[in-house]
Structure formats: structure tokens, C-alpha cells
Amino acid sequence: MKKLLFILAIAITGVTSAQTLSGSTSDVKKAKATLSSSSNSESVSNNKEMQSQIKEQLVENEELGTMAIKHLKSNPETSSKLSKLYKDNKGSVSGIMKSVMSDPKLSSKVMDWVNKNPEVLEKAMSLVKM
């Protein structure tokens, strides 16, 4: 359900790209509420593309990737797995994020984190030009 809301939130942001969300929690909640009431299958397929683009930006953008890594480090459920990835990738943010995105559990944790943080969501959306 959270993933669907995230996808829908991204869709409304894309539709209203001419308008800038202030980044406040209430704005994101309004977007989620508006989108959860619609069930357009075309927008869902577009949202999958947007979600894919955000994942790509998490890998390519060092600042966004570093923020995600810090989140995973602070999470007791993911910190040990992240430590292993850090060693395997010799500290490369891009390499770590590629490994994170290829792991379904870690990827889900990161995307949930992006969805729950309006500032991060806004930054990610600005990177994918939405």
C-alpha cells in the first residue's frame, strides 16, 4: 500500500510540475490523498517509470545516495547488511547504491524512506525533472 501511495504521489508531482510543492508534510499528504482516490491505470504505469527514475538517481546522484546510505546505517535492521556492502564496494557511494537497489529488502527500505521524507522526495523529483 505504501508503494502505491508513493507511486501516486510521484504522479501528482509530475502532473503539477508547473506548481512547486513547498515540501511540507501536509502538501505530500494532500497529494497522496488526491492520488489514492484515482485509479487510472495509465498513471500507474507512468509511476513505475518515475519510481525507476528515482532509483536510478539514488545510484547516480552522490548526495542523494549518501543520504540513503546514512539512513540505512542508522536502521538496526539494515546496518549489518550495509556494512558488508560498504566493504565489498570499497566505500563507493554508487557501488553501494547499485547493490542496495539490487537487494529487494534494502531497496524497499530506501524507497519507503524516500516516500516518508518530503524533502528527500522533492530532491529526488527535482533530479528526475518532474
Image (tube, helix red, strand yellow):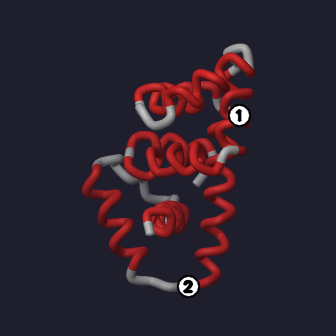
Q: Which residue lies at the image location 65% right of the left edge and 70% below the top edge?
A: 46
Looking at the rendering, which quadrant does residue 28 occupy?
Answer: bottom left
* 10 Å crowding of disc 1: few (<14), some (14-19), many (20+): some
Rendered image quadrant of residue 66: top right
| In-front residue for pair 107/32 | 107
> Which quadrant of the rendered structure holds the C terminus?
bottom right
Q: Position of residue 103 (x, y in %)?
A: 67, 45
Residue 113 horizontal/vertical position (percent):
44, 45
Q: Would you name the residue on which mark 1 appears?
A: 60
Nearest to the observer: residue 49 or residue 78: 78
Residue 57 horizontal/vertical position (percent): 66, 41
Neighbour tally class for label 2: few under 14, some 14-19, many 20 plus, Cα within 10 Å:
few
In the visual, does 88 lie left or right of 50? Answer: right
* Residue ID at (42%, 74%): 35
Vertical arrangement, residue 7 with respect to residue 102, above or below: below
Q: Which quadrant: the N terminus?
A: bottom left
Asked whether the beta carbons under mark 1 and mark 2 sit within 8 Å of each other, the answer is no
Residue at figure coordinates x 37%, y 66% from the top left? 31
- Which mark sits nearer the N-terminus, 1 or 2? 2
SS label for mark 1: helix
The location of residue 52, given as percent across then percent down, is 68, 55
The total of numbered circles placed on residues is 2
Q: Secondary structure at mark 2?
A: loop
What amino acid is found at the position of numbered circle 2 in the picture? Asn
Q: Is residue 27 left or right of residue 54?
A: left
The residue that mark 2 highlights is 40
Q: Spatial distance from mark 1 to mark 2, Cα to Cα?
A: 30 Å
Instruction: Single out the residue that lies furthest toward the left.
Output: 26
